[in-house]
Amino acid sequence: MRSSRWGWRSGAALALVVGVTAAAQAAPKLTAETPRVDLGEVIAGLAKVAEFTLSNTGSDPLKIEKVVPGCGCMTTSFPETLQPGEKGVVKVTLNSQMLWSGTVEKHVTVVSNDPEQASMDLSLTAKIRPLFTFSPQNPSVVNYKKGQAVKQIFTVTPDPGSGLKITGVAPGASMAEGRILPPEPGDKPGVVRVEVTANPPDGGGDFMGIVPLATTHPSLTVIPLLINAVSADGITVSPSFLYLTGLGTGTKAPPVTTVALFKRAGSFKVLEVKSDNAALKAVVNEEGGAAVPGGATYREISIRYLGGLPKGQISGKITVTTDDPSVPKIEIPYQATIGDVGTF
């Protein structure tokens, strides 16, 4: 009997081990046959698709939960399930930007139910060929002081052999104006010079001026000229416009957002900050404001939603009063969407 009892226990233990081993083997397994794709040459501003072949080398169905792109310049499509032994293709569309150039590398993350590898990295590379080159570099950084004109002359050269041309300044300029300058002796065919005059906001601070140029390309009909104007003496507000979303109708977990005020040269104080809506309380964050090495000053304003607004959308402004005589008042517009409780 004793021998029989021990024999039964040994047999049960062996069965348990075999069962555990079988369960471990009966699992999905994600394998990338093409973990890296070289797209070759891509025209700046156009899209190109990379295809990654995946397979399920396990013995249970593989579920691809999501494919997360590493930046907003990519979109993805993928099979949601791969049966054992089945292959599938993850398609990643690289939407290149018009002002890109040179070699770029991008990554996407595949999340699945593979118990040994919950996420997998895939990468793509591309050599971006711009259709136009710019001198100085586009975007261009220009330093300015309040009261000064912000100007930049760009020389725009089409890709040799493309036959493309700049036909003029297109509608849609933002905080800037542009004009095509007359050609000069010795200018090469197709090369144009564009004078961009940026218009600083009344309160000064950093801003971006945009002038769109019309081209003869059938798809890339417009390319932008950008000036990043950097203020030497004004107060920069970031963000300059508040989009407040995810606000609840109640008061549970009131969300907070922060606005930064920055001045590169000289100090300033925030004397008062007011919201035009009682449901949005704006206060100076004393702990978040201080002098910065190099003579700069940084201040923070916290904006807390107190709840109680009905569902819908409202807009208004936060008004900041400072002791800076050149920028005594700053108005920060906002747009708030009230719905389910959340954060912004």
Image (spheres, rainbow, N blue to C red):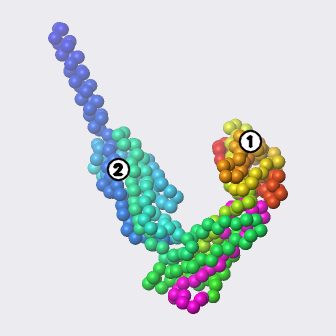
Residue 230 percent coordinates (x, y): 67, 63
Q: Is residue 114 above or below residue 176?
A: above
Label 2–label 1 contact, CB within 8 A: no
Q: Is residue 189 magenta?
A: yes
Residue 210 percent coordinates (x, y): 64, 70
Image point 40% across, 46% down: which residue? 119
- Residue 335 visible: no
Residue 51 percent coordinates (x, y): 37, 61
Label 1 neighbour load within 10 Å: few <14, some 14-19, many 20+? few
Q: Is 198 situated left or right of 48 in this image?
A: right
Q: Which residues are magenta?
A: 183-209
Q: Is 129 situated left or right of 60 in this image?
A: right
From the viewer's side, name the closer residue of 16 and 110: 110
Label 2 neighbour load within 10 Å: few <14, some 14-19, many 20+? many
Which residue type carries mark 1? Answer: Glu
Secondary structure of the residue carrying numbered label 2:
strand
From the viewer's side, name the closer residue of 157 and 113: 157
Looking at the image, which residue sits at the far top?
Answer: 1
Read off the residue under disc 2. 82
Image point 65% across, 43% down: which residue? 342
Secondary structure of the residue carrying numbered label 1:
strand
Q: CA distance from mark 2 to mark 1?
A: 55 Å
Image point 74% across, 59% down: which residue? 234
Looking at the image, which residue sits at the far bottom?
Answer: 185
From the viewer's side, name the closer residue of 265 and 311: 265
Which residue type carries mark 2? Answer: Leu
Read off the residue under disc 1. 286
Please, what is the dominant secondary structure of the magenta stretch? Answer: loop
Q: Is 103 situated left or right of 285 in this image?
A: left
N-terminal of the two: label 2 or label 1?
A: 2
